[in-house]
Image (cartoon, rainbow, N blue to C red):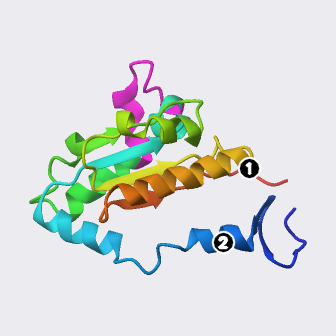
């Protein structure tokens, strides 16, 4: 899978991107750095972090909807980010977990979050972490994902947006 190369396309496993899609993916390179701006903010004041995604973000696989969230919520990637922020900037980010919002909704793709973005996000987040690794299943989902990213990036000039991927690793015989 993905071993053939089609001219004008980039192949990533079984997902192939056209030149136009690749060009759209780098449209924000020339803007001022959002992550360096986030680092400067973190040193000055508490950050508001929101995580958008599906089941992985929501924590469904870790029992967060069964009342067992305290035992396993430390596995959630956005909780790890909050802990990192608190360790990195203890004077300003000591309440990082209190300023971290889990906006994940199980079993939905990016269309839902794109359409309900303002209802899902806290007011004026500094960082939005986006994860839809399992909930992207076709061209339409990828178009919604791109629209979600563009909507986030155009909502505030200094909003940092980070996309994360969740990989399932399995032993190979």
Provide the secondary structure element on which disc 2 rests: helix
Could you say which is closer to the camera, residue 106 or residue 67? Answer: 106
Classify 10 Å Cα crowding around label 2: few (below 14), some (14-19), many (20 and above): few
Q: Which residue is mark 2?
A: 22
Provide the secondary structure element on which disc 1 rests: helix
Q: Are marks 2 and 1 in contact (CB under 8 Å)?
A: no
Could you say which is closer to the camera, residue 38 or residue 62? Answer: 38
Direction from residue 70 to residue 163 in the image, left or right: right
Q: In the rendered image of this protein, does residue 65 appear above or below residue 41?
A: above
The residue that appears at 27% across and 56% down in the rendered structure is 126
Asked whether residue 96 is in view, the answer is: yes
- How far separated are the C-alphas under marks 2 and 1? 14 Å
Dot label at residue 139: 1
Residue 78, x across and y down, in percent: 38, 47
Per the rendered image, the range of residues in magenta is 61-77
Residue 59, x across and y down, in percent: 47, 34
Dot label at residue 2: none
Residue 170, x across and y down, in percent: 72, 50
Direction from residue 126 to residue 130 in the image, left or right: right
Residue 67, x across and y down, in percent: 39, 19
Residue 72 counted in the magenta span: yes
The residue that appears at 40% across and 45% down in the rendered structure is 51
Tell which circle, 2 or 1, labels the residue nearer the N-terminal end. Answer: 2
Q: In the rendered image of this protein, does residue 46 appear above or below residue 51?
A: below
The residue that appears at 49% across and 55% down in the rendered structure is 149
State the residue lying farthest toward the right: 4
Asked whether residue 168 is in view, the answer is: no
Quadrant assignment, res 8: bottom right
Residue 110 counted in the magenta span: no
Direction from residue 51 to residue 61 in the image, left or right: right
Classify 10 Å Cα crowding around label 1: few (below 14), some (14-19), many (20 and above): few
Quadrant holding the N terminus: bottom right
């Amino acid at each position: 899978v993905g071993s053939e190369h089609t001219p004008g396309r980039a192949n990533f496993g079984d997902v192939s991107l056209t030149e136009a899609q690749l060009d759209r993916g780098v449209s924000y390179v020339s803007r001022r750095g959002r992550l360096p701006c986030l680092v400067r903010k973190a040193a000055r004041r508490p950050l508001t972090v929101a995580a958008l995604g599906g089941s992985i973000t929501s924590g469904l696989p870790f029992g967060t909807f069964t009342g067992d969230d305290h035992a396993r919520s430390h596995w959630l990637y956005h909780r790890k980010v909050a802990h990192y922020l608190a360790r990195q900037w203890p004077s300003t980010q000591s309440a990082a977990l209190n300023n971290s919002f889990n906006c994940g909704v199980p079993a939905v793709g990016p269309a839902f979050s794109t359409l309900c973005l303002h209802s899902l996000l806290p007011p004026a987040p500094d960082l939005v972490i986006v994860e839809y690794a399992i909930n992207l299943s076709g061209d339409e989902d990828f178009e919604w994902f791109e629209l979600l990213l563009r909507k986030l990036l155009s909502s505030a000039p200094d909003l940092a947006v980070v996309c994360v991927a969740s990989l399932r690793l399995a032993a190979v015989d």
